[in-house]
Amino acid sequence: MIQSIINFCVRERLIVVIISVIAIAYGIYATSQVPIDAIPNVGENQVIVFTAWPGRSPKDVEDQVTYPLSVALLAVPEAESVRGKSLFGYSFVQVTFSDETDFYWARSRVAEQLGTAAAFLPDGVVPTLGPDATGLGQVLYYVLDPAPEMTLADLRSLQDFVVKYELQAVPGVSEVASVGGYVRQYQIEVDPDRLRFHDIPLDQLIKAVKDSNIDVGAKTVESSGMEFIIRGRGFIGAEMDPQQAVEDIEATVIRSRDGIPVRIRDLGSVQLGPDFRRGAIDLNGAEAVGGVVVMRFGENPRAVIERVNEKIRQIEPGLGGVKIRPIYDRTGLIDETVGTLTTALTQQVLITVVVILLFLLHVRASFVVAVTLPAAVLLAFVGMKQFGVDANIMSLAGIAIAIGTMVDMAIIVSETIYDHLASWERDGRPGGKARRITVVQQAAGEVAPAVVTAVTTTVVSFLPVFMLTGRDYKLFAPLAWTKTFSLVAALIVAITIVPLLSRLLLTSTRLTLFKKLAGATVLSLLLAATSYWLWGDIAAEYLAIGRFILTIASAAVGWVLGYWMLSERLRPVETNPVSRLIQFLYEPTLRWFLAHKAAFFCLPAAVILLGLGAWFGLPGVLKPVEKVSSLLGANLNEVPGYVSAKHIFTGLESDDWIALDEGSWFYMPTLYPAASFTQAMEVLQTQDALIAEIPEVENVLGKIGRVESALDPAPAAMVETYVMLKPREEWREGITPQDIWSQINAVATLPGVTPASPLQPIEGRVVMLQSGIKASMAIRIYGDSLEGLAEASFAVADQLREIPQVNASTVNPDIVLGKPYVEFDVDREAAARYGMSTMMVNQIIETALGGMNLTTTVEGRERYPIRVRYERDLRERIESLSRLPVVTHSGEVVPLGMLAKMATTWGPGVINSEDARLVAHVSFSPAGYVGDLETVRAVEDALYESQRDGTLELPTGYAIRAVGSFENQIEANQQLMWVLPLVVFTNLFIIYLQFRRLPITLAVFAGIPVAFAGGMIMLAINGVEMNTAVWVGFIALFGIAVDDGVVIATYLDQVFRRRALSTVEDIRNATVEAGLRRIRPCLMTTFTTIIALLPVLLSSGRGADVAKAMAWPVFGGMVMELLTLFVVPVVYCGFKELKMNMGLADEDWQAEATIESGEAALA
């Protein structure tokens, strides 16, 4: 079948060209349609249920809202966990589904369940679904720069009723959440003495205010042939004048007695003021007003941000001098991250072309190979578009890692065709053009099976990546997809386009001097024009090369290349200087290794031993060797370099994952829960002003509390600060991001503030979404009472501080009962004596002390609440609250203390739960000298031992568990324990299917342990920690480590089948012949793979660390894979010699009958 495809493509030039042009054009189109982001969406598949119950304590919210909802939502199909959080006035329930569950199907199932759960909630409490977005959907933060004389309240009104709705209408935006400033509120301050004087209960006043704010309609009336709509106007604020609205409220009548009305102004005062708030922001220490743009699920982040910025440019002129300033968005991170990999990809293509040109010394042959790279990459983008794979650092890294392998296919095919065509021309071109086409078809068909096998092993070996789960699957599945797309595309190009281009371009031209000069001149002018118009600005900006110099240089290069291309001829491989040099070095080396196999095998054995030492630690690996040598009277420590090697290769540490350098820090310190909102805001502004003074900091956007979004379940005392850094070139010399973080912690750790764990914005969101904590690791305590959790959290914290692997200063237990409460316990008997129910007394407490928003004004498009409350003087001091006068329905006035007993106590500021059980956390960080997994293991062992010996006593039914981002690594390690062996044995099986002969299979397979050891050595040298990204790099290595072995073994098999072998010398000569015939293409493929990775390894831009973690194993493995050029021939030859020396039968001993056919096949 493959041969038929090749024959068709070589023969039907026009059809193949048309199909190729269409495919490439569609690939170019696909590059503009594929969504672009910095990293894959690794957020949990969550649906958030948000419920507001203003004024209610976290305990009330937990008992009456969060707990009933959590119990009901546990029954939702395919729900994996239900996590609840109860705050002052709000309830958040996060229902997490498996990644395979459709996002909108999950929302519909939760919505259905809410209909059942609503029956168990208090009257008037309505749960709602959060926005159709993930926790990582907050793509842009902005602030409003005020015009002169604008207040924070004016800015907030502009944000709420103009900017918010304009931006929310942008396609792809799910929600725009406001934060900061003050929401305007009409405040009715009631004097209880006046209520008593006029004998008016508070609930009567409340009813009057509600009844005074209403419009009505009375259908229509006809007059003079026209229809008039009848409308009764009564909305407060209809005149859109705040002062008029105040007067309207003051004139509201409560009741009338003897024709004398009692109005609001007779009972107190009405004024404009700020509404109660639970969130605020500041910019560099100055309070500000802004918003958060939340992207809809499945949208293109880059496109959404661009559309939002375009809308901002459109609406700014109409905002009266107010400017919208984006402070944090992912555009810069996306551009830099994608730019890093895009630049590396471009450099890889150019370097690969240069390497091929140096090997072949033939421009047109190099062009045949080089053109396959952009074609295959564009076809890979077609696959990305069709399968919904986003362009991000992981997917582009998949292409970058595959570049070297992609070009290998074209190298092998084109080099074989070149070799056969050169031989055909040397023989005088027998058969003419028809025979030339046949030669191209036969040459491509000769190596096509090996190419298909090599690609199949690479692709199949990467399929187990799809078997990863959780966050690691989300991270690495895009890489696996794009690597697969790239290799399949490269294979298609290699067996379709490369043979056709070889037919068209690989020929010895016999042009006149005039035609050569004319052709070179035309190419020179084309290249010069392209450089002048397309590349001039880029060269001036990045290379400091003027447009004129670039044009002249391009013209000169174009002329030389053009003349060279039109003059070059196909020359036999043996006449190529590079080939002669390679064969000159390779043949004697291979013959020596064949003659001294034991000495040769010491080399890969040493590499494998060193690789194991790099992985587990050389001292431990070599301990048995040292014991044996000491018994023999030798001391290995006296060997030069031995002790140094043991100090270098001490073993690789494990880490969770390589964090993407986002170019900003996410500072989340912990304040004491009892801190007031005002105090917390002062701390925030002080911190941010100090952080802004650090020279490398560009902007500091701080948030206290929550934005008005269901995606932000932050308590009022929770600080989140985005620290945006300047470009690296503006930093002080020698400063690292970690140094900046240390300075942030140093200047911002004020009295009463706990230092924060180092996190970045996206990283921090991922951690909080996954485990509900704001640190990388914590101990989660499950219990049944808040008091028990409070005691247990402090007991666990004391134990953690004693563990050496834990940084004691970072141990931070949840202050479960850290919020002061003033509780009024209604005396039912006393209230009954005054004709009042418990609800009446509580309503007075709720309204008179806390204040209640009764109704809303309608001022054009704006809406503002009207609130009633006792005067401030009466509620400023806690000890005087019990003396508040209450007008009963019987007309008597009694102090509140006679109706309810007042007491101060401690209670929860936040209540967390999981699967309807209460939980608390004790967060911590590892000491500097140990990794996350080692720390967690030590903590789990120590806590388990403490429970056994009674040092740590927990109440009956309580349980503890370590949680955090390290769980991903544990889960990944468990998957990799069987995925990696599966990859290895799959490769072995595929190789066997290709050759159907065990000796050849084992010879080829021998390259994998050598390559694996090389990868480990390279990791140790560069100090790279082991994580899932590194293991994915090894999976990629296993797929390509056998490619050269497959090609060499294929030719070894062919040579051995066509030659009569009767002596050991015959076997060695046949081995050398096969090696010499395939050393150049194999060396080219290995070198291109190695050198193609250099741009990735040498890159230093944003996202480079993630790509490097996957590239180092491939680079180190391929460097050592050069040994395969000797391992496969030596092992294969060794098998054959062993069989011959033992007198065993072998089909190659009877090869005389196939000599003629074999020679014809290789001609």
Image (tube, grey):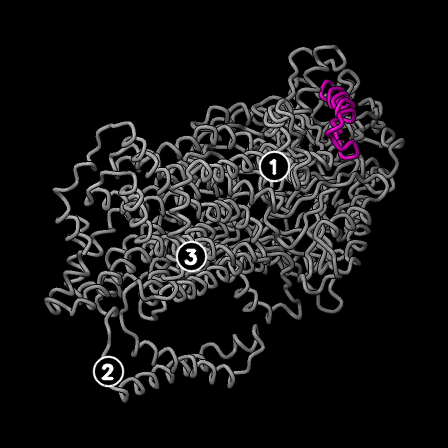
One can see residue 1135 in this view: yes
Would you say the residues marked 2 and 1 are in contact, meaning their CB atoms lie under 8 Å apart? no
Q: In this view, does 993 lie above or below 1050?
A: above
Q: Which of 410 and 817 is in front in this view?
A: 410
CA distance separating discs 3 and 1: 28 Å
Percent from the top left, x then y, of residue 1075? 33, 49
- Which structural element holds mark 2? loop
Amino acid at pointer 3: Thr
CA distance separating discs 2 and 1: 61 Å
- Which structural element holds mark 3? helix
Q: In this view, does 98 lie above or below 312?
A: above
Mark number, residue 511 = 2
CA distance separating discs 2 and 3: 33 Å
The magenta region covers 788-816
Q: Mark 3 or mark 2, which is nearer the start of the sequence?
A: 2
Q: Mark 1 or mark 3, which is nearer the start of the sequence?
A: 1
Q: Which of 714 and 975 is in front in this view?
A: 975
